[in-house]
Image: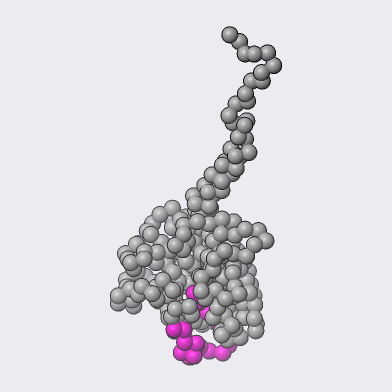
Amino acid sequence: MGEKEGTARRAPWWRRHIVLLAVAIAIAALALDAFVIEPDNIQVNHYVIHGNVASPLKIADLSDLHTRGLGRPERKVLAILAKENPDVILITGDTLADPFGNYAVCLKVYKQFHAPLGVWFINGNWEDLRPVRHARQYYREAGINWLVNQNHELRPDVWLIGLDDAAVGRPNLSVAMQGVPENVYRIAMFHAPIFFNVIAGNVDLVLAGHTHGGQVRIPFVKPFWLPEGSGPYLEGWYEEKNSRMYVNRGVGMSNIPVRFLCRPEVAFITVER
């Protein structure tokens, strides 16, 4: 028999649940972006600043690689560096990702980095909490200049100052600055940006990381998470006492492998007169 007269035919299931379906699709799209797309979508930032240098200096600023080997993000970073051809590569800590301190994967990545004025590295909190055995020998074999509470002449007009991590390490500014000439351009590297209020006024440029830019960002809402040692700094440029600091969002991620509205980055800073 046919349907009774006046009985309405039921709408398809997807029409009856269209709101729930739209919400489920939106959540799936956001999850895909946060866990798959954005973590590999490295942003390349370029800046030109002015300083007392004899000739332009192009710096590749890397931070928080948290590498697990030569995967897609690492290969993208290497391709970016090859294209940009910086004068020097400065890495502000936390290359390690393995919670048990397996530095073998870091070594594979380090050996791919090359620049005319060298590749320089300072400890992050991961390296301080899980120290590599025979650190100086390890970094030398990796082709990396390890600079912790020390300084080095990068070229006659530019000196590099490397400091231990302020969050869990022991930065020593007086030791690190010892012997640095007065009339040169001074670049300081450290991991946790909270140390900026200590060093400001002593150097021209500071490079830091550690914050990951918050990793998950919601417009008009404060970051849900920032590691200890971030202080009032999140990402980008800060200035105090004639010192400028750039806080890099980093390439890798912390314990939770997610980024949202906070792309990984590689920054290139060119210092010129």
- The answer to whether residue 75 shows anywhere in this view is yes
Q: Nearer the viewer, residue 4 or 193?
A: 4
Quadrant in which the C terminus is drawn: bottom right
Measured along the vertical axis of the image, is residue 161 above or below residue 33? below
Residue found 53% across the figure and 57% down from its top: 259
Please name whichever residue, 4 or 120, is drawn nearer the observer in this view of the structure: 4
Q: Residue at x 53, y 49 (%)?
A: 31
Residue lying at the far front of the rendered structure: 4
Q: Which residues are magenta?
A: 170-192
In which quadrant of the rendered image does the N terminus lie? Answer: top right
Q: Which picture quadrant has residue 187?
A: bottom right
**Residue at 64 percent of width and 13 percent of height:** 4
> Is residue 1 positioned above or below 249 on the image?
above
Query: Does the magenta run of residues contain 175?
Result: yes
Verify whether residue 201 appears in magenta: no
Q: Position of residue 144 (x, y in %)?
A: 39, 72
Snapshot colouring: one colour
Q: From the viewer's side, name the closer residue of 90 and 64.
A: 64
For the question of whether residue 140 can be seen, the reply is no
Which quadrant of the figure has residue 255?
bottom left
Query: Percent from the top left, x then y, of residue 250?
Result: 51, 64
**Position of 15 relative to 31 (above/below):** above
Q: Total marks drawn?
A: 0
For this orientation, the residue located farthest to the right is 6
Residue 115, horizontal then vertical, whole percent: 45, 67
- Give the vertical position of 30 relative to 151 (above or below): above
Left or right: 202 in relation to 35: right
The residue depicted at 52 percent of the width and 76 percent of the height is 229
Residue 152, image x, y percentages: 46, 82
